[in-house]
Image (tube, rainbow, N blue to C red):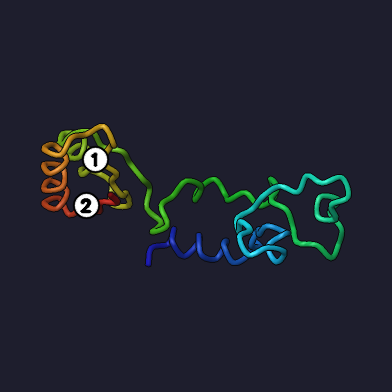
Amino acid sequence: MSAGRRKMLRLKKRKPRFLNLALHRKLGTVRSWRRPRGIDNKQRLKLKSRPKQPNIGYKNPEEIRGLHPSGRKPVVVHNPEELRSLAEGKEDIIVYIAHTVGERKRSLIREEAFKLGMKLAN
């Protein structure tokens, strides 16, 4: 496990899970976070007994912000030449093939990444 991945997991434990407050009321309620907007909503009023709301204080440190869950830095590649230029100095990257790349060039990029020993995300 890389150092970036370990650090991300450690920081994730510190954050509360931000869930929808009305989760228990209906069967089809969305689980993911929805901002409380009601006039008398206790969570919006930030009462002590209610779940925490996301705010700027829960932001990740700059050195791990935007990293892939594996702890590697994501890089978008459009052609095999870009992939070769990335292979020279960086080990801790993960490659995404751009969505505009067609199937023929995508297969060339996949083969090149395999030869260079680079990780592909898509």
In the image: residue 6, left or right of residue 58: left
Residue depicted at x 17% and y 40%: 106
| Left or right of 78 on screen, residue 16 | right
Q: Secondary structure at mark 2?
A: loop
* Quarter assignment of residue 56: top right
Return the disc, 1 or 2, that comes first in the chain's sequence: 1
Query: Residue flagged by tag 2: what amino acid is it?
Result: Met
Q: CA distance from mark 1 to mark 2?
A: 10 Å
Left or right: 62 as drawn, with respect to 109: right
x and y, in percent, of residue 39 in the image: 87, 45
Q: Which mark is residue 86?
A: 1
Report whether 118 appears left or right of 72: left
Residue sitting at 15 percent across and 50 percent down?
A: 116
Identify residue type, mark 1.
Leu
Pick the front one: 122 or 91: 122
- Residue 98, image x and y in percent? 28, 36
Q: Which residue is mark 2?
A: 118
Are the residues tagged 1 and 2 within 8 Å (C-beta)? yes
* Residue 71 image point, x, y percent: 41, 56
Q: Residue at x 28, y 46 (%)?
A: 95
How dense is the environment of label 1, judged by Cα within 10 Å: few (below 14), some, or many (20 and up)? some
Q: Quadrant of residue 25?
A: bottom right
